[in-house]
Image: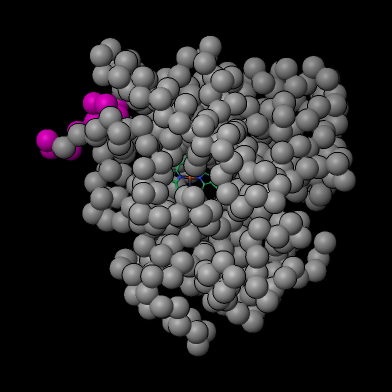
């Protein structure tokens, strides 16, 4: 699919658009850098320059209504499940600083042996057969187990937590919002996290939940509610995005066999493989903001109060920044990719996502000598929040 899908209105729920959003993005960047969709009443920014400004500039672009296009997730209460992702300074600054006392780069780095263990468990099981589903057997399991490990969720509860997490983010075909099952799952999860926080307050361990319960800045500390909504945010922000990154890497790798061969021949090339996949087809394509003031772009004015979409996936293909942007090229400079956002909301889990992807994919390419994906049988998820696959049938030849 290389056509430009319904550009006049630009419908982010359109399946044709999901199939290949990039021709639409290119058209938008060229012809309508701030498009107004009157049906769903949003504006969309598509150029790298405008999106960089939007994530960095204070005082114009607010996250206080949430950052998702979905109606249920949009409104002044978005912070209840999205924590500081759905806040502006000074509330966001305070919470992010407190959480950062517990969620440190050191804690992430120290997780390496556990991530290796989780990777080994799921990968060994998958590689027992030379044909399996990359998402169902591996990529869909590993990130949630890593987050559970970080939070201190016992192994015996992890399958259930993964099931609830999947229900929370799953969208039914043609339905534009969170499903009732998803809402039930989210409530069950919040109950589970409340018990976890209460137990760590009574008896601290060395997990992140205990560190958050103990975190302080001066006399300021996190309340139970604040910790719970952060745990919930991590599950939503850090699970599906990483699963989809792992899927997109093998999908685009196998679509560009010369690039994948170079990684199979030299596993240190996993780092540029991960970075180019993040640029080329990032799992978090669209962020929303509400405008605090009028905004003028390309001769159009969006009034204060409007909902503005930041098309990160489009920014990453802007030829003003990335030469020959539609080429998947592991040797290019990806340093200006906007896959993890930027500015004050820059992804807090970027280090963790990179560490997980590097460990998982390195372990994978060290164990296999060839990889094939049945591209025609790949199943794409139709979500406005994440881009990637729910099924990727894979055939491998294990190294002898
Ligand atoms: C490939 C994987 C990932 C991608 C593409 C991704 C993408 C993003 C993006 C674009 C933002 C900025 C949102 C905004 O500006 O409104 C963000 C924020 C965030 N991400 Fe990630 N993320 C990934 C993995 C993770 C992981 C593994 C975690 C944690 C376990 C995580 C936790 C967060 C948090 C807490 C925020 C909110 C930061 C703030 O509002 O100050 N992310 N992520």
- Residue at 87%, 46% in the rendered image: 376
In the picture, residue 162 is in which quadrant? top right
In the rendered view, tell whether residue 296 sits above or below residue 171: below
Residue 77 at what x, y percent from top left?
Answer: 36, 49
Tell me the quarter of the image containing the N terminus.
Answer: bottom right
- In this view, the residue in front, 267 or 233, is 233
Residue 391 at what x, y percent from top left?
Answer: 76, 37
- In this view, the residue in front, 381 or 376, is 381
In the rendered view, tell whether residue 208 sits above or below residue 310: above
- Residue at 45%, 54% in the rendered image: 74
Is residue 4 part of the magenta span, yes or no? no
- Direction from residue 340 to residue 389 in the image, left or right: right
- Res 317 seen here: no
Residue 341 at what x, y percent from top left?
Answer: 47, 55
Is residue 213 part of the magenta span, yes or no? yes
* Residue sticking out furthest to the front: 180
* Residue sticking out furthest to the left: 219
Q: How many marks on residues?
A: 0
In the picture, residue 58 is in which quadrant? bottom left
- Direction from residue 353 to residue 121 in the image, left or right: right
- Res 304 seen here: yes
Residue 355 at what x, y percent from top left?
Answer: 53, 35
Tell me the quarter of the image containing the C terminus.
Answer: top right
- Residue at 45%, 78% in the rendered image: 302
Magenta residue span: 211-219
């Amino acid at each position: 699919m290389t056509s430009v899908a319904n550009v006049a209105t630009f419908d982010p729920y359109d399946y044709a658009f999901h199939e290949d959003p990039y021709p639409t993005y290119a058209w938008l960047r060229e012809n309508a850098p701030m498009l107004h969709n009157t049906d769903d009443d949003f504006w969309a920014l598509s150029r790298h320059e405008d999106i960089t400004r939007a994530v960095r500039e204070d005082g114009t672009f607010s996250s206080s209504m949430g950052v998702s296009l979905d109606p249920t997730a949009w409104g002044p209460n978005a912070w209840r499940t999205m924590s500081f992702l759905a806040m502006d300074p000074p509330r966001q600054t305070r919470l992010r600083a407190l959480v950062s006392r517990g969620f440190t780069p050191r804690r992430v780095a120290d997780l390496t042996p556990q991530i290796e263990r989780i990777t080994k468990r799921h990968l060994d099981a998958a590689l027992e057969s030379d044909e399996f589903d990359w998402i169902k057997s591996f990529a869909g399991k590993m990130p949630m187990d890593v987050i559970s490990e970080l939070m201190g969720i016992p192994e015996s509860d992890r399958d259930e937590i993964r099931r609830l997490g999947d229900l929370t983010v799953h969208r039914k075909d043609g339905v534009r919002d969170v499903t009732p099952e998803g809402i039930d799952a989210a409530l069950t999860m919040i109950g589970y996290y409340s018990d976890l926080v209460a137990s760590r307050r009574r008896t601290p361990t060395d997990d992140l939940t205990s560190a958050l319960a103990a975190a302080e800045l001066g006399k300021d500390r996190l309340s139970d509610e604040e910790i719970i909504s952060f745990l919930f945010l991590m599950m939503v922000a850090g699970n599906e995005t990483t699963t989809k990154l792992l899927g997109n890497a093998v999908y685009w790798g196998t679509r560009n066999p010369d690039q994948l061969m170079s990684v199979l021949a030299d596993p240190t090339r996993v780092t540029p493989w991960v970075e180019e996949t993040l640029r080329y087809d990032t799992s978090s394509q669209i962020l929303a903001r509400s405008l605090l003031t009028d905004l003028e772009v390309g001769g159009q004015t969006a009034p204060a109060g409007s909902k503005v979409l930041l098309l990160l996936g489009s920014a990453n293909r802007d030829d003003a920044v990335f030469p020959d942007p539609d080429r998947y090229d592991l040797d290019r400079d990806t340093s200006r990719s906007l896959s993890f956002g930027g500015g004050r909301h820059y992804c807090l889990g970027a280090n963790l996502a990179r560490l997980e992807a590097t460990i998982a994919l390195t372990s994978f390419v060290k164990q296999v000598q060839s990889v094939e994906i049945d591209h025609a049988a790949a199943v794409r998820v139709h979500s406005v929040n994440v881009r990637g696959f729910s099924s990727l049938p894979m055939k491998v030849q294990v190294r002898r």
